[in-house]
Image (cartoon, rainbow, N blue to C red):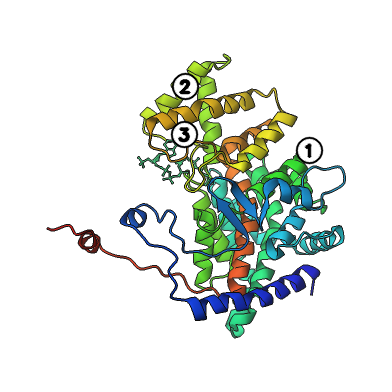
Amino acid sequence: MSTLKRILKEKIDAHRPRTTKLLKEFGDVKVGEVTIEQIIGGMRDIKSLVTDISYLDPLEGIRFRGKTIPDAMAALPKPAGKDYPYVEAFWFFLLTGEIPSMEQTKEVIEDFKSRSTIPQYVFDIIRALPKDSHPMVMLSTAVLAMQRESKFAKWYEEGFKKLDAWDTMYEDSTDILAKLPGISAFIYRLKYKNDKQIADPNIDFGSNFAHMMGIAAPYDDVARMYFVLHSDHESGNVSAHTTHLVASALSDAYYSLSAGLGGLAGPLHGLANQEVLRWLQEVMEKLNGEEPTEELMKKFVEETLDSGQVIPGFGHAVLRKTDPRYQQQREFCQKHLPNDKIFKYVDMLFHVVPPILLAKGKAKNPWPNVDAQSGVIQWFYGVQEYDFYTVMFGVGRALGVLANITWDRGLGYALERPKSLTTDMLEAVAGIKK
Ligand code: HAX
């Protein structure tokens, strides 16, 4: 058994009595109340999920395993001369809550290498899709197509033992993750580079992705930063919740992640990063090379809102401050591309949009989220096909959701099955007489 898997097993065994005790001895303790607004309004703030992998404070932003983004980034092992940590080390950290040593990280890297070969049928299936399919369709299809490889599904057929179910979930999750850099880069080069593919150099997660994309350093570090930042944001966001929900039916990691990626592909969620760039391109076209002034930008923002659209990259269902994932990327831009034209546009939006959204009085959070800044960096390093951005988000998000469903199995979380009411019933609860 690998060091990571052994430590994970120890952690799960140690944690299980806490969940059991809460359930058995304190199962009827009330945590909160539910209002009609919450039921109709997308279940905002209803406390009904458990995860120890990340926690999102509305004012502070995300903490991974109790650590802020800068603290986690600083503590994790990095390749020599690089600014961002090994993705494999981050996977170890998400699963166990422990910062791995360099030696433990190297062991995970070798493990990923041994699992990274992508079956030929995956390439054949992606190639068989219509060329104009969205790359998220390609990614989700590739993951789903590999379901026949599921160790969990085979193990389940042979006889299911609840306490051991995390083992094959972990195996499936690691198998999928190890293949994602290759699958996503394949999609990119198939769609946008005439299917001229580049072989896997077998270095580490971030380096492999950058190399197969065909982009030189420091893009490997950009990839590491990007995947870590997009990994996890508690369990209630659409992609995490969908993955968890599907897994709760004892569906394996392939079915679950593929479904979660479908949620990430929505414009109110992960697709917002491509929408930001699309919107900016429209603005730049209208400006016809002119330097944007604050007045002009305000006009474009107002026009977008008046046409009934949202401003992509701004607002959040939970956060009430600027997203620290946005800040991290902004700091990267200030260091590496301070004079980039699109960065200047995005930075101007940072000043222009919040007062307008505040004045409209609708959005509960007028501040930028992770998606406002991420496309700028990709664009700068040559990935200008913005409909690919959500695929990279998906690769990062896989780390978080797969760690979560492994723990779901470890702690034996139940099938999800909330209760529905009819409108008549809600009206009766509200005391409306008809
Ligand atoms: N532009 C215009 N209006 C906005 C807005 C924005 N950026 N953000 C919120 N609003 C509006 C909402 O559409 C809503 O209007 P209606 O009452 O007419 O429906 C109102 O303000 C209240 O919304 P809210 O309670 O503040 O926000 P929600 O929890 O309902 O939605 C969203 C959160 C992120 C979906 C929302 O802020 C939005 O649409 N933002 C733009 C899209 C975006 O950037 N999505 C990515 C979010 C981060 C993420 O998940 N990445 O994957």
* Ligand 1 has an atom within 8 Å of the beta carbon of the residue at disc 3: yes
- Quadrant housing the C terminus: bottom left
Q: Is residue 232 visible?
A: yes
Q: Which residue is disc 3 drawn over?
A: 311
Q: Earlier in the sequence, mark 2 or mark 1?
A: 1
Q: Is residue 162 left or right of residue 295?
A: right
Q: Amino acid at mark 3?
A: Ile
Q: Is residue 214 visible?
A: no
Q: Amino acid at mark 1?
A: Pro
Task: Report how many numbered discs are placed on residues in the image.
Answer: 3
In the image, residue 117 lies at what x, y percent? 74, 61
Q: Amino acid at mark 2?
A: Lys
Q: Is residue 101 left or right of residue 121?
A: right
In the image, residue 102 lies at what x, y percent? 85, 57
Count neighbours of disc 2 (C-alpha within 10 A) and say few if under 14, some if 14 to 19, many if 20 or more: some
In the image, residue 81 lies at what x, y percent? 86, 42
Q: Residue at x 42, y 63 (%)?
A: 32
Q: Nearer the viewer, residue 26 or 305?
A: 26
Dot in front, 3 or 1: 3
In the image, residue 208 lies at what x, y percent? 77, 49
Work out how far the residue at label 3 is from the one at label 1, CA to CA, in angstroms: 30 Å
Q: Which residue is disc 2 drawn over?
A: 298
Q: Nearer the viewer, residue 342 or 98?
A: 98
Circle 1 sits in a helix, a strand or a loop, which is it? loop
Q: Nearer the viewer, residue 38 or 190?
A: 38
Q: Quadrant of residue 431?
A: bottom left
Q: Which residue is disc 1 drawn over?
A: 218
